[in-house]
Amino acid sequence: MFEVTLDLAVMLILAAFAAGFVDSIAGGGGLITVPALLLAGVPPAQALATNKVQGAFGAATAAASYARAGLVDLRTQGGSALIAGAAGALGAALVSWLPVQALNYILPAILLAIAAFFALKPGLNDLDRARRMGAGVFAATIVPLIGFYDGLIGPGTGAFFMLGFVMLAGYGILKATAHTKLLNFASNMGGLIAFAIAGAPLWAIGLAMGVAQVAGAWLGSRLAVRIGSRVIKPLLVVTSTALALRLIWRLIAE
């Protein structure tokens, strides 16, 4: 049975704070917390489940902060959130039935392409642009697809939502970030419910990390609202690239 010593608890709480800060701006918080949980000795399945516990706190805090700033209307996005949550639950429920490992071979290329897009494409700022897909179609196709991925695997979900909102919904960078956090919270909760039914999460350390996530997400979302795309774009590029390199390293190590 996994036991948390004081030094491990401090490490995990600090990792959760850093993850909450980064994730609230550009996503990729799992890049920090999942390795931290594994380094602490948490078994892989429990690490993923516990990450959902603490990650939900950070995503909820960021979504609420962006909503208070007027960047997302929670009432009009309720349907999309429910879809993301259901898809996340389905993905988590099927994690042991689907060939998840095969996705790890194509994810690095996708994430590097997303990083290059946000780094090199001119004109990406906080201003909205022409919508390429209606809100209903977006909610019925893109939202469940990414939500399902979040429950199934998770890392990179924020980057995928960001790309969808910017390229297809026509949102500016800051508005896309705000909506990403709402849907990321919903898919997180769906995945968490599925994991909780299986009895996998370590609730005590997950909740302790969740408190640190709240603090980090509050600070990060306030910074993003104040500075906008000037901080979101670089951090999104860095986190997407780092996640891709981590996946490549893991494949090589295997």
Image (cartoon, rainbow, N blue to C red):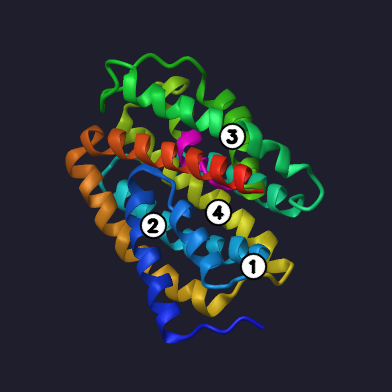
Q: What residue type is labelled 3?
A: Leu
Q: Is residue 159 magenta?
A: yes
Q: Which disc number belongs to residue 83?
A: none
Residue most extreme to the front: 253
Q: Over which residues does the magenta segment extend?
A: 154-161
Mark 1 or 4, nearer chain start: 1
Q: Which of marks 1 and 4 is in front?
A: 1
Mark 4 or 3, nearer chain start: 3
Q: How far apart are marks 2 and 3 (CA)?
A: 21 Å
Residue bearing mark 2: 19
Residue bearing mark 1: 46
Mark 2 or 3, nearer chain start: 2
Q: Which amino acid does label 1 sit on?
A: Gln
Q: What residue type is labelled 2?
A: Ala
Residue bearing mark 3: 107
Measured as percent of width and height from the top left, residue 240 is found at 43, 38
| Residue occupying the point 56% across, 76% down | 203
Q: Distance between the residues labelled 4 and 2?
A: 15 Å
Q: Do the residues labelled 3 and 1 touch (CB within 8 Å)?
A: no
Measured as percent of width and height from the top left, residue 210 is found at 43, 68
Q: What element carries label 2?
A: helix
Q: What element carries label 4?
A: helix
